[in-house]
Amino acid sequence: MSEAIPEKYRDLFNKRAFASLATIMPDGRPQVTPVWCDFDGSHVIINSAKGRQKDRNLRRDPRVALAIIDPDNPYRYLEIRGRVVEITEEGALQHIDKMAKKYLDADKYPYGQPGEVRVLYKIQPEHASMMG
């Protein structure tokens, strides 16, 4: 279990709560993207497509920050800072279907593009702050 994320806030990963993921551009500027997120008890898991800006940023610099706002109470949130400790294509297709079920109530991810390669990013939380 990740000690950085308090038990009291882990319910956010079971809700349809989007995370705002901040990565670092080559010139040092931040880049923020809304993403679906998951938690395996140790790592925050993000799923994206190979070649996108966040993919390129995370492969170059693994430092990230995420903010997850409770969809039931926008004054309750969890902010996580950490780093990507694993990047893999293994299991990514099955995971995006799992996320489609959670966020869209769809059995299959409907937005895949021909030739798209899905990628999982496992983020080790190093610090968390929260409110609410």
Image (spheres, rainbow, N blue to C red):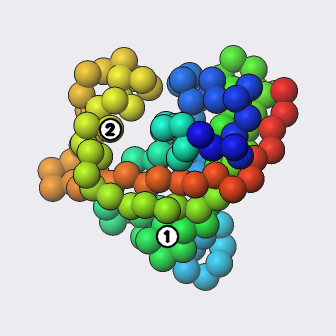
- Residue at mark 2: 95
User: Badges 2 and 1: C-beta atoms under 8 Å apart?
Assistant: no
SS class, disc 1:
helix
The numbered mark at residue 57 is 1
Q: Distance between the residues labelled 2 and 1?
A: 21 Å
Residue 64, horizontal then vertical, whole percent: 61, 60
In the displayed image of the protein, which residue is found farthest to the bottom? 27
**Residue 5 can be seen, yes or no:** yes
Residue 117 appears at what percent x and percent y?
23, 55
Residue 55 coordinates in the image, percent (x, y): 42, 63
Query: What's the residue at 39%, 61% (across, down)?
Result: 87
Q: Can residue 67 be seen in this view?
A: no
Residue that appears at 65% across and 66% down: 30
Q: Which of 1 and 31 is in front in this view?
A: 1
Give me the residue at 49% from left, 70% from top: 57
The correct choice, above or below, for 38 with respect to 122 in the image is above
Residue 59 image offset from top left, x and y in percent: 44, 71
Q: Residue furthest front?
A: 1
Mark 2 vs mark 1: which is more N-terminal?
1
The picture quadrant where one finds residue 94 is top left
How crowded is the residue under tag 1: few (<14 C-alpha within 10 Å), some, or many (20+)? many
Kindly identify the amino acid type of the residue bearing the numbered disc 1: Asn
Quadrant where the N terminus sits is: top right
Which residue shows up at 15% across the image and 50% down it? 114
